[in-house]
Image (cartoon, helix red, strand yellow):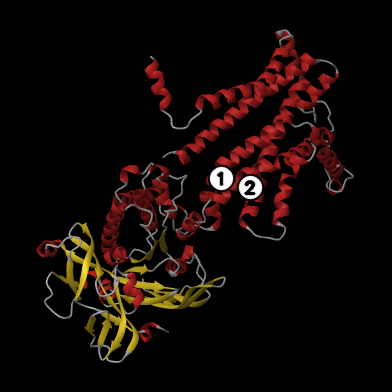
Amino acid sequence: MELTLKKRKRNTIIPGFSLTLGYTMLYLSIIVLLPLSMIFFNTFSMSWSEFFETISHPRAVASYRLTLSTALAAGLMNVVFGTIIAWVLVRYQFPGKRIVDGLVDLPFALPTAVAGIALATLYAPNGWIGQFFDFKIAYTPLGIIIALTFIGLPFVVRTVQPVLQNLGIEIEEASASLGANRLQTFFKVIFPELIPAVITGFSLAFARALGEYGSVVFIAGNMPMETEITPLIIMTKLEQYDYAGATAIATVMLVASFIFLLIINIIQWYTNRKFNQF
Amino acid sequence: MSIQVQNVSKMFGSFQALNNVSIDIESGELIALLGPSGSGKTTLLRILAGLEGLDEGAILFDGHNITNVSPKERKIGFVFQHYALFRHMTVFDNVAYGLKVRPRKERPSKEEIAKKVNDLLALVKLENLADRYPSQLSGGQRQRVALARALAVEPKVLLLDEPFGALDAKVRKELRRWLRKLHNEFHVTSIFVTHDQEEALDVANRIIVMNNGKIEQVGTPEEVYEQPNSPFVYDFLGNVNLFKGRLHNGKLTHGQFEINVPTHLDSHDDAIGYVRPHDIHIEKENSNNDTVAATIVHIHLLGPIVQIELKREDIDEYLEAEVTKEHYRELGIKKGDVVYIRPKQLKVFVPEDFSI
């Protein structure tokens, strides 16, 4: 018995497996799982019927739909423009490149409320940008998408950038020598190589957008049923000391986020497979 | 397709990669561009492919000036040293790529593409691996996929950039033979870059030896090996012993050696004689006056050929000799023995021969 145990231990060359795994588990438990389980714990003070009533309230359902759709739209916007920005930053030399590179991270550093106020001022019907449009941008879902795009910008750029950097020029030359034009080379050769990074960037930006509160409340207008996001509903309930109600909604968010991230991870695993085989 | 390279020059910053290079290549030739790293051989190949621009000169394919034609319109096949396969595509899709990206009017039907790809995969003996991804293949298999991919577009010229450089010795030899066979079947004009002289001598019909952005010599493998026209070529193609000495009245003096050089009757103080290791004659007894005594320092047994390192007795210089195994047995020499040596054949270069 002891012999087999020892044997097993020796099978791996990399040391410290049990130590690092133990640490990972402890850390994740204290930092992630414990706080999250408190949400479920708090929710237990409600009865099932109360719980379902709270989470299926029309206002709540409308907010789920809004939060999800705007987060998805913002994530996709960031995929397109984040990839373009990463491309420009990697492929071309131009004056002020470092500054542009630094600007990308700014949405991370800025307090989200500041971003929200700034965006609301710009896109308000009489704001610098808003005045040029016949339709309203701020105080509509469009404004929410803009705010979420803003705060999610760095994710796709920062995940795609290193992959693009390591992508050899050779495969592009090979593609050109085989008679492909630039567009074909990009869509058939370069973009597929970027897909795993793009999905990672998308899932990060999407997850961030799902939980975003600070920047959105200023530009959203917060009209129930129309521009009220789920995090705001939670805040409102908290301000009314309805802790159980707030955590019930939070539970829905939590489960939904988890399922989405799980699906994205499965897609990620699937696309990564062909690159990692040996 | 015949290729003319006319007075091509190329600078990278202040580095002269190619300096007024001109070559004529006939249709169906198998050419090796041979040279040390930094000699401009890869640059020349990339210029032929259109992957690199040139500063001066022109490239002609079949008499047409294609200097400013993009790589996709040159009808070339290019094989990279590190394969440059598309990682996210299967072997089949990699080979089919060049056919699939054609404009709709010229694109073969799906069935035609499949047939062509399968034929090519059979040619490179990878028909069983069509569904694999490049990451699941060995280096030699990957390079064969790269070759099949390049051949799929039916190129008029096949350009290979150190195609076997990243492979181990055995696979390299196998692929070399295979490339020759392929060329004999298809007769597509092929140019490959290599820094391995053995590879160039083994595979090519004609070798272009390059150094410092210039062409040193062009000729068949025999010509460049037997009659190198410069010390550089002599040095680069195979091992060589140097006899630096004084040339006077058709005799090269070096230590106790006095060697007849009928080709050079003038006098020089710093002439250099080049002798291949297999052109050094070894005998046990001093039969003639023109030999020099030397001690055997080391003996390498390399299959049929025996390499012998010698230290000359007259001056402190080392020499390398090669004899066949049979001859080695006949001689019955061992490490530490004193033998008598004499160059059987020697090529002398005086500074004027190679200074420009």
Q: A242 or A20: which is nearer to us? A: A20
- Nearest the eye: B206 or B76: B206
Looking at the image, is A267 positioned above or below residue A33?
A: below
Asked if B159 appears above or below A183 in the picture, the reply is: below
Look at the picture and state if B264 lies above or below B136: below
Question: Which residue is drawn at the image coordinates 15% and 61% (left, top)?
Answer: B325
Q: Quadrant of the N terminus of chain B?
A: bottom left
Residue visible at 30% across and 63% down? B199
Q: Which residue is mark 1?
A: A194
Q: Are marks 2 and 1 in contact (CB under 8 Å)?
A: yes
- Residue A121 point in image, percent of width and height: 87, 42
Looking at the image, can residue A56 be seen? no
Where is residue A194? Give x, y as percent.
Answer: 56, 45
Which badge, 2 or 1, comes first in the chain's sequence?
2
Q: Could you give the CA–CA distance between mark 2 and mark 1, rounded to whole angstroms?
A: 9 Å
What kind of residue is marked 1?
A: Leu
Q: Residue B33: image x %, image y %?
A: 37, 69
Q: Amino acid at mark 2?
A: Thr
Badge 2: how crowded within 10 Å, few (<14), some, or many (20+)? many
Which of the 4 image quadrants contains residue A227?
Answer: top right
Q: Is residue B11 left or right of residue B140?
A: right
Residue projecting furthest to the left: B330
**Pointer 2: what residue?**
A83
